Amino acid sequence: MRRGNRNGRTQRRITTRTALCILLASWGSSAAAQTQPARPPVRRPVAAPPGTGVRVRAFGEAGIRRFAAAQTFDAVLGSSIGPLFGGGVDVLWGRHLSVELGISRYRGSGERVFVSGGEVFPLGIPASVTVMPIAATVSYRFAQPGSQTIPFIGGGINWHRLTETSDFAETGDDVSSTFTGFHLQGGAEWRLTRHVGIAGVGRWSTVPDALGTEPSSAATAFGEHNLGGFDATVRIVIGRR
Amino acid sequence: MALLACVVGILGITAVAQSPREVAGRLIGDYLLPPIDRGLRDVDPPRPPRRSASRYLPGSVVVKFRSGTSAGVRRSLTTMVRGDMVAPLSNADFDVMRLQTGDDAESVARRLSAQPDVEYAQARYLARPLFTPNDPLYRLQWNFPAIDMERAWDVNPGATAAITVAILDSGVAYRSAVLRQTAGPWRREDGVLMPALGTIDIPFAAAPDLAGPDRFVSPRDFIWDDVLPLDFDGHGTHVAGTVGQLTNNSLGGAGMAFNVKIMPVKVVDSEWDEAFNSPYVGTDDLIARGIRYATDNGAKVINMSIGRSGPPAPVIEAAIRYAVSRGAFVAQAGGNQFGSGETERYAEFAPAIDGMVAVGAVGPTRQHASYSSVGPFIELVAPGGDFAVRSPADARDGVLQQTLDLDLVETWAGSVAQYRAPRFDSFAYYYFTGTSMAAPHVSGFAALLMQQGITSPAAIEAIMKQFATDLGPPGRDDQYGYGLINPRASLRGMGLAK
């Protein structure tokens, strides 16, 4: 108990706001935070030592996804890269194990097309697509006592909810289906304060056979079947390390 | 007179460019049809394809509170979604709630629907007209519902005047005129000698359900080598009607791409051309020139409801390759030689040309038409009608369009005693059958696809094949090719997943 309290006094001398600014300005350089001017020590409530017990945390994240079906997304939505927003909870067991459940959302709009010989002909019929991945991930955290940087790697199962709507659609024309896939992820978390961290996460996911099963799918024309892709997100974590 | 001078002036300019024969010798004046009430059609501008941005009206939702819900609860629910009620509406047992800018109507409707005091809530979804032409004879045009045209017209209502379809045929009843012709003696196909009629003035008029302001462009007659491709037969006018009969004008019937411009190019002769001793007849070389003319003068689609058996036609193939290479799509009738088994020579090379389609015919039951040629060159089928589908035969199984009144045109068809000068200024609706009637369905379809954004002839052929409704044995076959054209599915094209 005493050791944890002492660590809190000596290593968390900067405010959340200051740390956020510093970290966003110099991504990945957590050492810079150590050079901030010292402040008088603040007495904090007694808490469990970091890296022990079960801790439940919440996170919100924002980033981008590059879809594996790049030609298909590029043809219909104008880009194979789009913004991704989400959040979730993770549960830490001890120092190294994390289980997280997250949900995110991508939404794009474009128009229906025809693809012939690799050439894309936009048809002027508005279409919108929503991809909502729900991911359950088990991660190993390389947490070291006293270190503010915690790299992690993990993997898990995901469920991608795909919704596609377009003008002039009738019964059975629109799409609303869920597909199962797998993913691997890695990244690093930096502690900003005792209860706030920021993480950079890269995730590769595969969702096979979700696209390209219909003749009226641009994915069929391109021979692309995977709804997965690569996500790069920044995550704000609320909770103890 | 000013109009006549203008027409002659225009013809003169074209004559210099194309070197056609002077028409003044034949054209002796305009002849006007008796007045026909054509409604507002002539002032109906071409409609662009519909490109709506949203399926519902943003900024408001429809909500129905359960009966007995107090005003206070209503207010609190309204406040919950940051909305405010509009004044009560007449003829409505529901309310409309205005939303804050940026609030998604569907999301708000879902939130409201989840409340126990709300019976239902929904976004204000936009309804669209399900287009059914109001043309009184449309109910007899089984050929359009057979290929789901009503839903296709919802997606693309008839293309626009930006697309020109060339009709390479017996001419088109595209304008009023009086021609002075000399009918000498000639021999009918059955060997009967038809007597001379001497010099006669023959009235012509534009088909009322086809003509409109600026409807026709770059007319050209290769049979008379001038720029007056008037129809002496009725075939070309019927074909042009299937492509672009004026539609939703409360008159007659409908056409596939009813807003396009039509380029009449006369390349085949009829009995009256022979009787009037036209300088040319419809030979391969002349038709090839017609194809090149249409291409060079801006046709995006070329309809060829003409053809022949016999030896191959390399000059036609070369001309079609020329047309396709310059961005024109070609629809070619697949031939009516099922009985003889002969190959349609103008169609046989279609599989080798991406951007040209050879079209077979189906009857009203969507079965192979009894006359429609079969072979490896048939790529698609479209409605061509079939009088043999029922016994006794029923004329309504043909394809209905307006054309010349054949009672006044085919005066040569009866006894010699009944033979007299024709009139080409009277019109009626006729049921015709043949792959000649199937091909213009594909031409009109191609015009809709071009308007929708598919500008490459090869891509047009590809999308037609890809979305065709497979008939007969699974996959491509010699009777139906890749299947029956499916305009609605093709016009919607491809989404991400479906």
Image (cartoon, rainbow, N blue to C red):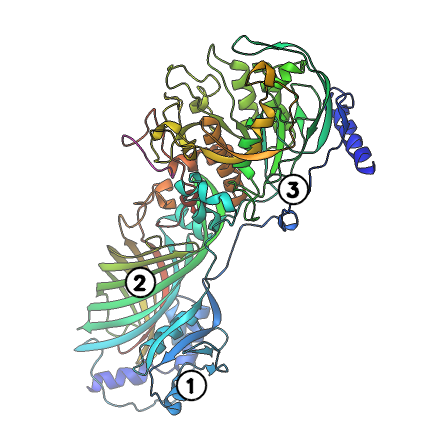
C-alpha gap between disc 1 and disc 3: 56 Å
Q: Which residues are magenta?
A: B467-473
Extreme residue toward the front, this view:
B417
Q: Amino acid at mark 2?
A: Gly
To which residue does mark 3 refer?
A: B212
Q: Give the foreground label among 2 and 1.
A: 1
C-alpha gap between disc 2 and disc 1: 43 Å
Same chain, labels 2 and 1 = no
Q: Nearer the viewer, residue B175 or A228?
A: B175
N-term mark: 1 or 3 = 1
Mostly what secondary structure, the magenta segment? Answer: loop
**One can see residue B414 in this view:** yes
Q: Give the foreground label among 1 and 3.
A: 3
Residue A187's disc is 2
The answer to if A212 sits in the magenta stretch is no
Horizontal side of residue A198 vs B138, given as left or right: left
Percent coordinates x, y for residue B368 in the rendering: 35, 29
Image marks 1 and 3: residues in contact by CB distance under 8 Å: no
Q: Amino acid at mark 1?
A: Thr
Q: Nearer the viewer, residue A118 or B312?
A: B312
To which residue does mark 1 refer?
A: B79
Binning the other alpha carbons within 10 Å of mark 3 as few (below 14), some (14 to 19) or many (20 upward) gives many
Q: Amino acid at mark 3?
A: Gly
Horizontal side of residue B155 vs A227, given as left or right: right
Residue B141's disc is none
Q: Nearer the viewer, residue B39 or B111?
A: B39
Output the chain of dot 3: B
Percent coordinates x, y for residue B469 in the rendering: 35, 38
Output the chain of dot 1: B
